[in-house]
Amino acid sequence: MLQFTVHGQHVELNERLRSYLDRKVGKLDRYLSTLRDAVVEIRHEPTRAVNQRYVVEITATNRGATLRAEERAPDIWTAIDNAAGAMARQARRHKERLHRLERGEELRAGAVIASAGAAPAGLVAAEEDEEEMLERVLGRVVRVKRFPMKPMSQEEALAQTELLGHNFFLFLDSETRQYSLLYRRDDGDYGLIVPQAG
């Protein structure tokens, strides 16, 4: 059975909840037998949107790959169900990918590597006049995540991006030994940003 640790924020981690997590999260290794440990974070956030008050985030590692699911729901039980379901789908997809790699099939890279000079439209800042700059309210950093950066190929970074369901992925390129940013384009393909000294 998959071993996992639970962290709660504004949530009581009682026996009923731990038992429910055992049933839902503890059996994720049946989809991918090499999953060994996971971290489950449960938060209650006092948001105005009632249907997003409970957040369940599950992060598991499998032979260097990170699988992650985050779901929001109006109640803790639905959030757990949804996050466990999302992790099960990721584990099945990852298992299929590993199986294809073992058979020597290439990952669907498509147009993974866009020209390094082409930045996504969201990174190009629009010009604003001084009044707008003064009126704009800046966000703040509310969460910091730290994680080890093992060198990986661009294909591995693409697989991680898809596994995590993110629109971007920062990685240490094993070929160039540089940090690179893989991002999903609006057309469904991927681009790669490679920093250069200015």
Image: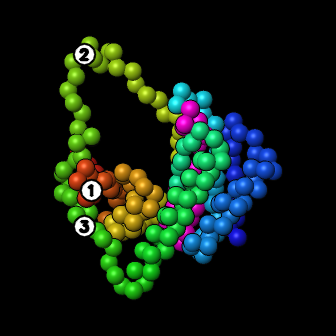
Q: Nearer the viewer, residue 139 or 42?
A: 42
Q: Residues within 10 Å of mark 2 (few under 14, many from 20)?
A: few
Measured as percent of width and height from the top left, residue 167 is found at 36, 51
For disc 3, the marked residue is 110
What is the distance, in whole Å, between disc 2 and disc 1 at their CAs? 36 Å
Identity, as a three-letter code, of the amino acid under mark 3 = Gly
Callout 2–callout 3 Cβ contact below 8 Å: no
Q: Which mark is residue 188?
A: 1
Q: Is residue 64 visible?
A: no
Quarter of the image for residue 31 reads bottom right
Going from N to C along the chain, the mark reached first, 3 or 1, is 3
Q: Residues within 10 Å of mark 3 (few under 14, many from 20)?
A: few
Q: How many marks?
A: 3
Quarter of the image for residue 34 reads bottom right
The secondary structure type at the circle numbered 2 is helix
Q: Nearer the viewer, residue 51 or 126?
A: 51
Identity, as a three-letter code, of the amino acid under mark 1 = Gly
Going from N to C along the chain, the mark reached first, 2 or 1, is 2
Measured as percent of width and height from the top left, residue 168 is found at 36, 52
The boundaries of the magenta stretch are: 50-68
**Magenta span dominant secondary structure:** strand
